[in-house]
Image (cartoon, rainbow, N blue to C red):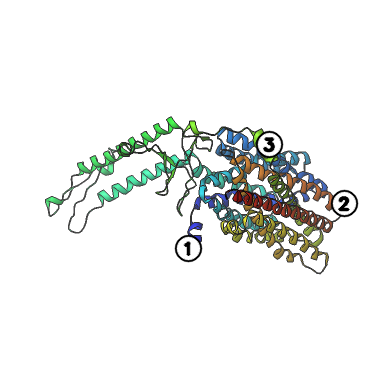
Amino acid sequence: MGESILNSFKKHTNIKLLYFFEFASLSCFQPFISIYLNSKQLKPSIIGIITCLIPFLSFLSSPFWANISDRFGIQKKIVIVNSLLSMIALLLLIPTGDNIVGIFILIGLYSIVSSPICPIVDSLVLKDLGEDSKLYGQQRLFGAISYGIVAFFTGMVINHFSMNYLYVIYAFWMVVFLIFYVFNQTKYGSKLKLTNSINSFKKLINEKTIGGTDENNDTEIDVITPGNPYDENSKGSTLKQSKSNSNIISSNDIVQSNENLIENEREDQLEQDLEMDEIGSLVFSSNNNSSQDLGEAILSSQNDNNNNNNNNNNTNEVLLKDGADFIKNEPITNGGDVEEIPIDLMYSEEKLTNKQVMKNIVKNPQMMIFLFAMVICGMTSNIISNFLFLFLKDHKNASNFLLGSTLPFTVVMELPFFFFGKQLLEKAGVTNMIIIGHSAYIIRLCLYNIFAIDSISAWFVLPIETLHGIAFATLWGAGVELSSQMAPKGYEAFYQGIFSGIYCGLGSGIGSIIGGFLYEHKSAFFLFRFTALITIVSLVVFTLSQLFYSRKQSNKSGIISQSHF
């Protein structure tokens, strides 16, 4: 079992790096937004209103972006363009200064354009994983690692310099993310990698051909490169006589061999380009080995011999660039994105409208209760993330260094829970994982009450924050898996957008408004206790509903089994 876990962990390397760079950028701004607004001398209620822009606008815009991306198959283009716009919006906060209207507008713009990035990346990753979708947690944990590490160093930077460095660091990591994303997820990156591979292959062939001498064969051959026939270095080529004439190799033969090799490669590349023009640029992210790219794969038609021997086999095969594995019967994509085109239109399913999809969700009471629980958990998470730092600064005089130090502790427990996400889903199931997530949030909120004792140091918050990893990893892993299972074919990004919008959007927005009001007009301790109570209600409702539907399902199964006798 240990070896199988280790082998699965080694797979999908580029997906792990993709999450690492994505969450490195997120960790530079979102954890510190309340501290940034507090530095502008704003009241907690105003901070709550401004911080609610990110989740509320995310909730409203995520389904829109998901629908556009699924309908037109432009997921990857949306990620690139919106990432650039989010970077520009935050950099413009530097010259904005204390202008509240400017801050409001720019954070609102950031909220709208950044909302589709995470759900689209999640949907692409799940599609890449395919049957390994339960390994999602092992990929996502690298986002948690980067979140904790980068946030820690970001806290150190703003503690020694100024808040404006938040946006500079964000821009840096976003550029790194985009470079990696373009190189691994677009057809341009795929062509670049193909070109590099061909060049490396040419170099290897030349080295093998020219460097084949040994002590007994002093043949020295300088080959004129076909691409540069007038190279000065090649004009003085010499041919030393070997002791045995049978071992002498003609340089003209080698040149001709190299020319034929390169010409064949060009013809193969031309055939691939023609196929991609006729069918559409087929791009998938590879999902096979440890050095695996999250990059583009290239459509490989079956050769003539296989077609003659297997006329009845019309299956399209996709040759993964970094492995020898083949994905069969996968839908063809348009322009490298994931808009699905059925291979056999006679058997294609009728495409659902957005209205029908939403009706299916609303008519499913079990799904609606799940979404209600995600609203409450999103509210709880946002209240803690936005107002815990304010509480520690106001009541415990915590430094920015301490606040940044809490973030590695918030993600440390995400690592084992994301790593063993597949095993948890198989053993515990979605329902139990959501119950565990609720329970971790409740315990965490209750433990904050120890700070009512004046002698308790603010540094005691560090071990408490480890509960965040348990809560978030279980809830997010279960939510992504359930959304993927429930989604009709072709609407994976839409369902991920709904889940992400409910958890990170609607729930978080409610948390910002309620949290800001209660923090200002009541107290931080009242806010934490109120939030714990609401989370308990959500836990009870969700647990009872799952027991009810589980019993109802078992009764149905019993009736069906009896009807067979």
Q: Which amino acid is tagged 2?
A: His
| Of labels 2 and 1, the one closer to you | 1
Which residue does the numbered mark 2 point to in the structure image? Answer: 521
Residue for point 73% across, 44% down: 506
Dot 2 falls on a residue whose secondary structure is helix
Which residue does the numbered mark 1 point to in the structure image? Answer: 3
Q: Which amino acid is tagged 1?
A: Glu
> Tag 1: Cα neighbours inside 10 Å, few (<14), some, or many (≥20)?
few
- Establish if 242 lies above or below 103: below
Determine which of the numbered discs, if any, sits on residue 359 in the image.
3
Dot 3 falls on a residue whose secondary structure is helix
| Of labels 3 and 2, the one closer to you | 3
Q: Is residue 137 visible?
A: yes
Looking at the rendering, which quadrant does residue 154 occupy?
bottom right
Q: Which amino acid is tagged 3?
A: Lys
Determine which of the numbered discs, if any, sits on residue 320 in the image.
none
